[in-house]
Image (tube, rainbow, N blue to C red):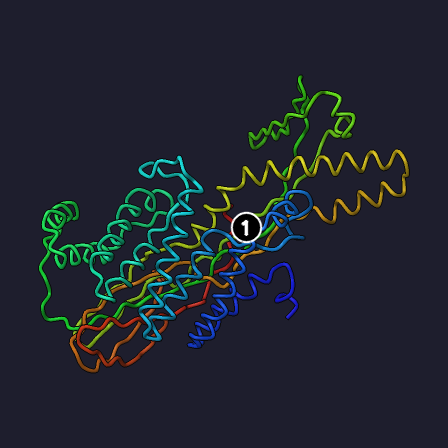
């Protein structure tokens, strides 16, 4: 209850929203996620919160969320709406996703998509948009979203996260190209994928199944020692020889060393956040019907994305934290000259407050898998069988019944929350 009113209240709404979704309380889940969305937008645009993080300690400021965490709000809301049968509301979340993706691309503008080194666009979210558009029979927008997802998987996801393009995405792109009459595009992608498309006239409905497995990483703290090396013209370098790190700062002039007390600072230790992975325990799953079996494919590795987003902003974290800690240390020395006891108190306060921000959304899945199952009209008994590459048979079996209507797409999700022991790979 304290978290709802505290600096981490964004995480309160994110965790409550996800748990409500896992319990099948989709309307309540969306209300909570909408509160998280509004709060996230407000906090990202709050200059006072940003300034406080730069001047004091990020733990004393409101948690604003990582890029991938804020995108996931719309993933869960869209899936919730689809399970409530509200395609129109799900499409609204698609449009919000599109706006967020454009902002993410603008944030890292200048990086070449074909040689991507930054998490600047999300292939799975683009794929999800295509699936939702197709469920609404908007095949043109579905084709565009699928095509964008294909390009992102090819240009970024394979190299950044070791996640290849799902075979199901290839089939969906070919099908929507066929349905739109895009003959040239169909032939081009048939050649690129090495697939000859044959339109299935027997299927009358579809089940799209999303399997969320494991739990995302947790944040912890690590520290680095830096030595101050002074140069000419107001230059001061924070250097760590072991890691090959060097961060230069320019002060107005050399007199600033003495005025700010930096002339007495030789060494500082700075705390930074790091991720600790919770490795997957269950990493394979199939959907079984009475007549066929369909493998679920990995479409999103949220664990890898979390590590990448933190890595992307580490240089900024270094730059902001180093000078802040050095100036706090200098203030401690200056205070000690005037009053030894007060200086000791300042030193104690500095040591206590210089902590890394280890807050993050810890109930998200490690990875997301999915598949599409074509089904004839009528009632079907369907099973999700979950296993591990180390197991000889199913670890979990979840049965359900689906009454399929002609022309409809059905959505189901399941979250296996088992994890292996923690693994620190920062």
Where is residue 169 drawn, in percent x and y?
24, 56
- Count of numbered circles on the image: 1
100 relative position to 232: left or right? left
Front in this rendered view, residue 393 or 310: 310
Which of the 4 quarters of the picture holds residue 267? Answer: top right
Q: Residue at x 39, y 44 (%)?
A: 105
The quadrant holding residue 295 is bottom left
**Residue sitting nearer the eye, 86 or 224:** 86
Question: Dot 1: what SS?
Answer: loop
Answer above or below: position of 49 versus 335: below
| Quarter location, residue 83 | bottom left
Q: Looking at the picture, how far across and down is residue 189, in whole percent?
A: 15, 48
Q: Nearer the viewer, residue 249 or 379?
A: 249
Q: Which residue is mark 1?
A: 45
Q: Is residue 314 shown above or below 138?
A: above
Q: Quadrant of the N terminus?
A: bottom right
User: Badge 1: how crowded within 10 Å, few (<14), some, or many (20+)?
Assistant: few
- The residue furthest top is 232
x and y, in percent, of residue 348 in the image? 80, 46
Is 180 placed left or right of 282 in the picture? left
User: In percent of the image, x 68 and y 43: which residue is there?
Assistant: 55
Left or right, 69 with respect to 377, comes to right
Spot occupied by residue 354 in the image (x, y as percentages of width and height): 70, 46
């Amino acid at each position: 209850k304290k978290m709802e009113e505290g600096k981490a209240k964004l995480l309160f709404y994110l965790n409550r929203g996800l748990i409500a979704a896992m319990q099948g309380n989709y309307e309540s889940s969306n209300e909570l996620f909408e509160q998280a969305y509004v709060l996230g937008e407000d906090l990202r645009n709050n200059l006072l919160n940003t300034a406080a993080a730069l001047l004091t300690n990020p733990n004393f400021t409101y948690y604003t969320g990582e890029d991938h965490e804020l995108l996931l709000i719309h993933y869960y809301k869209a899936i919730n709406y689809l399970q409530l049968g509200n395609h129109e509301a799900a499409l609204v979340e698609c449009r919000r996703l599109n706006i967020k993706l454009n902002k993410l691309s603008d944030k890292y503008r200048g990086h070449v998509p074909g040689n991507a080194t930054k998490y600047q666009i999300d292939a799975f979210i683009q794929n999800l948009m295509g699936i939702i558009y197709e469920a609404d029979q908007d095949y043109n927008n579905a084709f565009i979203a699928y095509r964008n997802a294909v390009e992102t998987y090819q240009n970024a996801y394979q190299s950044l996260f070791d996640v290849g393009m799902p075979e199901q995405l290839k089939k969906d792109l070919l099908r929507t190209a066929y349905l739109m009459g895009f003959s040239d595009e169909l032939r081009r992608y048939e050649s690129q994928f090495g697939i000859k498309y044959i339109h299935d006239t027997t299927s009358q409905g579809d089940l799209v199944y999303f399997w969320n497995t494991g739990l995302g990483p947790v944040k912890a703290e690590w520290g680095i020692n830096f030595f101050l090396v002074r140069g000419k013209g107001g230059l001061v370098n924070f250097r760590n020889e072991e890691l090959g790190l060097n961060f230069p700062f320019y002060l107005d002039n050399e007199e600033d060393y003495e005025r700010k007390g930096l002339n007495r600072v030789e060494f500082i230790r700075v705390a930074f956040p790091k991720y600790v992975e919770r490795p997957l325990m269950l990493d394979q799953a199939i959907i079984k019907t009475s007549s066929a079996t369909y493998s679920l494919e990995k479409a999103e590795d949220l664990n890898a994305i979390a590590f990448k987003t933190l890595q992307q902003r580490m240089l900024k974290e270094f730059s902001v934290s180093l000078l802040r800690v050095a100036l706090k240390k200098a203030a401690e020395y200056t205070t000690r000259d005037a009053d030894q006891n007060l200086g000791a108190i300042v030193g104690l306060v500095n040591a206590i407050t210089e902590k890394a921000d280890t807050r993050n959304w810890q109930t998200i899945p490690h990875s997301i898998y999915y598949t599409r199952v074509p089904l004839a009209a009528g009632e079907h008994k369907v099973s999700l069988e979950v296993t591990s590459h180390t197991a000889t048979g199913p670890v979990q079996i979840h049965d359900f019944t689906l009454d399929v209507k002609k022309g409809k797409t059905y959505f189901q999700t399941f979250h296996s929350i088992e994890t292996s022991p923690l693994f620190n790979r920062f």
